[in-house]
Every structure is written in C-alpha cells, then in structure tokens.
Amino acid sequence: MLSKTEKQFLEGNYAPSANHRRFLRHNINKKLKEFYELELPLLQNTNVSEFTNGVSEFTNRSRSDGILESLERGTNPRPNAYEAFALPG
C-alpha cells in the first residue's frame, strides 16, 4: 500500500524537503481515504479478514492420550527419483 519512501517518512527515517514532505503527506492521505472508503468496507463484509492459515492450522494434531501427532514424513522416506524409476533386476 505505502511506498518505501512513504514508510520511511512515517517512521522518521527520511527527512524530505518541504515540497516533497507536502507531496508525501498528500499521497498518504489519498491512500488512506481510498482504503477507508473503498477497501475496508469490502473486507468488513466478507470473511477474509481472518489472519489464519488453513494449511498450517492442522500441522500438529493431538491424540487422545495427549501426545502430539505430527503430519511430517515418517521414518521411511520416499525413494529418490532414480530409485523409484529404476528397472527391476
């Protein structure tokens, strides 16, 4: 959303000239106005505002005895490509 220069300006790591400071403030205000008027209402009316990752949500499952069961690869890994496609014999 914000450019690198705009972020540095807001963090106080960039000291622009008076004209450039005015320009940066104008751009930041314009972007904020657009966000609040157009994008925020869209996000509020949908379910995409959750910050969870459905993939990593199930990486570890708890068994009934309280031990975590990992979904990682077991002790017997898949064969390498050259082993998997090798001719028998």
Image (cartoon, rainbow, N blue to C red):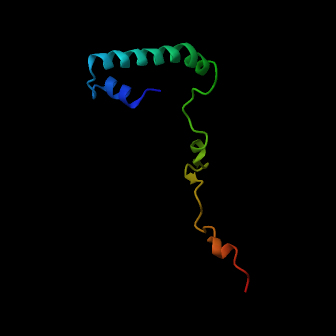
Q: Quadrant of residue 25?
A: top left
Q: Quadrant of residue 78?
A: bottom right
Residue shown at 49% from the left, 13% from the top:
33
Q: Nearer the viewer, residue 72 or 6?
A: 6
Q: Residue furthest right?
A: 88
Residue shown at 41% from the left, 18% from the top:
28
In the displayed structure image, the side of residue 62 where residue 3 appears, left or right: left
Across and down, in percent, residue 19 comes to 31, 16
Across and down, in percent, residue 11 comes to 31, 26
Q: Residue furthest bottom?
A: 89
Q: Nearer the viewer, residue 61 or 12?
A: 12
Q: Is residue 45 above or below residue 50?
A: above
Q: Is residue 60 above or below residue 22?
A: below
Residue shown at 26% from the left, 24% from the top:
15
Q: Is residue 74 above or below residue 50?
A: below
Q: Nearer the viewer, residue 72 or 85?
A: 85
| Number of on-image labels | 0
Across and down, in percent, residue 89 comes to 73, 86
Across and down, in percent, residue 29 comes to 43, 15
